[in-house]
Image: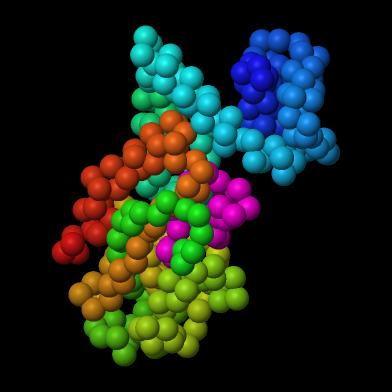
Amino acid sequence: MDWNNLRFFLEVARTRQLTAAARSLAVEHTTVARRIQALEKDLGQQLFARGNTGYRLTEAGRRLLPKAEAMESAFSAIERSSSDQQHMMSGQVRIGAPDGYGAVVLAPQLSALTRQYPNLGVELLAVPRTVHLSRREADIVITLERPERGPYIITRLSDYVLKLYASADYLQRHAPITCLEDLREHTFISYIDDLLYSKELFYLEEIGKPRHVALRSTSILAQQEAAAAGAGLAILPAFSAARDKNLHCVLSEQIVFTRTFWMLMPIELKDIARMKITWNFLRSQADANQALMMQGTPT
C-alpha cells in the first residue's frame, strides 16, 4: 500500500471536500480522486460516501481513520528528529465543553496552544449540552459527569465552585437577603428544567425552591448576563461570575456548590501526537488554574 494514498485519505476525511483537500495538498482535485480510488481498490472497500455536505466516511473509512492517523503521527515523529516539533505538529483537534467553561476558560488557553503549535487547528464546541464521543462529535470532551462505561481515557480535570449572585441594582430594589429563608420571596434565573443535560445542574432546589423564576435559559452565560442586568438571582460558576463587576456574591458562606469537570477521549486516539499534546496541555492548564476555579474556597 502506498503511504501517499493514506495522506490523501486523511485530508479528504478532514475537509470532506475533494477541492479543499486538493488545495491543502497543492494538487488537482482529479489527483485526489485518483488516489482515493487507488486506496479503495487496494483495500477492497469503499471509504467515502458522497452526500449533500460533501464526502462522508463509511464504516470502513471510520475504522481506517485512527490507524492512518497513527501512521501519520509515527511519520511525523521521524520528521521531528530533524525538525522543530512545534512547526511539524499539524491536523485538527475538536474539543467539546460546557458553554461557560469553554468560553471563559478554554478559549484563552487554547489560543496559547495554537500560538505554540501554529500548524495545529483547534475547534472548540462550547455548547450548553452534552457533546457525545460515541457520535464522534469531538475528539476530546470535557463533561460534568464521569461516564460509567465506554472505551475512553478519563481524567478528573478540575473541581469548581458555584455561588449565588445578583446585580447591585437588583439588590437595591428588593428586600435584604440575610439568610436562606429570605430567598423564597426573591426572583431567580435558572435553567429550563426539561432541557437540563446533566444531573449535576440540579442545584437550585437544594437552597429551597423559589416561588418565582423570571427567566430560564439553557446557557449559563445567558443566565449570567441576565443576572448582571438585574433580572434576578442566579447560581453561577465563580470562575465566570467573579469577573463581572456588576455581580455581587450573596450569602457567600452559606451557598457554595462544588462540581467537577471530567475530561475524556477515545482510547483509539491516545497515541496520535496532536491528541496527546492537546490532552496534556489541558491537563497542565487545569492544574495551574485551581485558584481560578475555586475562587478562594479551600481546596
- The colour scheme is rainbow
Magenta stretch, main secondary structure, is loop
At horizontal 35% and vertical 43% (from top left) the residue drawn is: 282
The quarter holding residue 262 reads bottom left
Q: Nearer the viewer, residue 277 or 236?
A: 277
Position of residue 121 relative to residue 285, above or below, is: above
Position of residue 151 relative to residue 199, above or below, is: above
Q: Position of residue 64 (x, y in %)?
A: 64, 36
Q: Nearer the viewer, residue 11 or 166?
A: 11
The magenta stretch is 124-146
**How many labels, in total?**
0
Q: Nearer the viewer, residue 171 or 225?
A: 225
The quarter holding residue 238 reads bottom left
Position of residue 171 relative to residue 69, above or below, is: below
Name the outermost residue toward the left: 298
Q: Position of residue 258 (x, y in %)?
A: 30, 69
| Residue 43 appears left or right of 141 | right
Q: Position of residue 223 (x, y in %)?
A: 47, 64
| Residue 277 appears left or right of 253 | right
Q: Is residue 189 visible?
A: no
